[in-house]
Image (tube, helix red, strand yellow):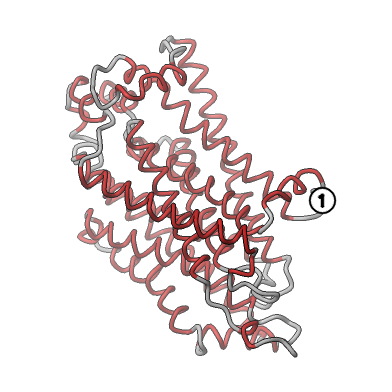
Amino acid sequence: MEKALKIPDEQIIADLLPRKFGKTGQLWVGLLMCICLLGVYAYYRQLRYGLGVTAMRDYVSWGLYISNFVFFVAISLVGSLITAILRLANVKWSTPLTRIAEMIAIAAIMFAALIIIIDMGRPERLLNVFVHGRIQSPIIWDVVVITTYFFISFLLLYLPLLPDIKILLSSPSAATRPFQKLYRVMGSFWKGTYAQTLISDKAINILCITIIPVAFGIHTVTSWLFATTFRPGWDSTNFGAYFISGAFLAGSGAVVVAMFVVRKAYQMDDYITDDHFDKMGKIVVLLALVYLYFNISEYLLPAFKMKEDEEAHLKELFVGDWAVKFWTTILVSMILPMLLLLFKSGRKPLPMFIAGIMIVTGAWFKRYIIVVPSMLHPFLPMHDVPLSYKSYFPSWEEWAIACGSLAGGMLVITLLVRIFPIVPIHETMVEKKAN
């Protein structure tokens, strides 16, 4: 941020205002929309013909959809890490990253909720979760905590945006004109007075404190959906910490990828600097070490006790049909990024981007490996069932819907970047004056 602090206010505003998409941006939006439309068509087929169009059966009843759900929930945790924890710790260098993190969190939590509705098969029964929800069930806890987390994340995106909306309303830039009516609806009341600023700062601090236990709660409760289900590989008291540590790593990887893309696309080298990548790289190394520790703990104890059912599950992961996927995922999502980022040269933007891609991709496959192999190894042996029940590979409809949801999340982030400043304008100018 050192370079940015030397830039005049007028130049900061000009640099950070939302911009129209160029040809590359238009192609990107068009590609995402096509993938989303394919997902919508696949979901239409699922609604028309039922969940029979998927490869899920009595044993593997949680497949690609639940893997996607856990992945989205994991990515969403980055909002609490970047916005809340670093803000409360008064870490000033994270300012350019807070809005990126919140946009990712909002998009991720939206599609986490959507993918659960898709997995239900009968979306009209969603109301029953609220009408007939049982407090004894982790499912109702998950619904409550996801809803709470979404609204807190929305407010953490919206409140710091108000001073920037005032700037957007006074901007003559052609890039912001199509959204002037939206800006007026969202923030015409904001005058930037001392009283308004004081209330906003207090509210943001309260939300930052509140979102941390809620964020920990959402991942703990999600882990309990697995841990309270009687399957090998899930019978663990370690699952809550295991999920939280993995979510921090996956979310940080997503922010690193977004940092690189935004910096390249909008020439923001003065605002998202090499120093930001260096500091984020150190955080990612720490998170990878923590997640690796919980992975070792998660698999070492069952391997030590080696109960019969756990033995079959672990052998399948370590040396069986899932071994290549399992070890590749561990290598790609944790070990290789950690080794790359240990060196200062590896914490430059391009190596960081590569590490971020590896972490996010590995995080998705890690969730798939958590879900599917355990479902294929029930405690009660599979007898007198069709051969298709003993294996699972997602149908094209499942892939289309899963890819459509991922594309939808990226589309939401892309549109938010088009409408709002991706780097906070007002906070950047305030920090310049403070220095």
**Snapshot quadrant of residue 214:** top right
**Snapshot quadrant of residue 414:** top left
Q: Position of residue 389 (x, y in %)?
A: 65, 82
Is 64 positioned to the left or the right of 404 in the image? right
Q: Residue at x 25, y 34 (%)?
A: 20
Q: Residue at x 32, y 46 (%)?
A: 29
Q: Position of residue 4 (x, y in %)?
A: 21, 32
In this rendering, does residue 247 appear at all?
Answer: no
Q: Amino acid at mark 1?
A: Arg
**Snapshot quadrant of residue 130:** top right
Whether 292 is drawn above or below 180: the answer is below
Q: Residues within 10 Å of mark 1 (few under 14, many from 20)?
A: few
Please name whichever residue, 182 or 291, is drawn nearer the observer in this view of the structure. 182
Please name whichever residue, 151 or 77, is drawn nearer the observer in this view of the structure. 151
Q: Residue at x 53, y 47 (%)?
A: 109
Is 352 positioned to the left or the right of 201 in the image? left
Q: Position of residue 341 (x, y in %)?
A: 29, 62
Whether 432 is drawn above or below 54: the answer is above
In this rendering, does residue 300 appear at all?
Answer: yes
Quadrant in which the N terminus appears: top left
Q: Which residue is mark 1?
A: 134
Count of numbered badges drawn on the protein: 1
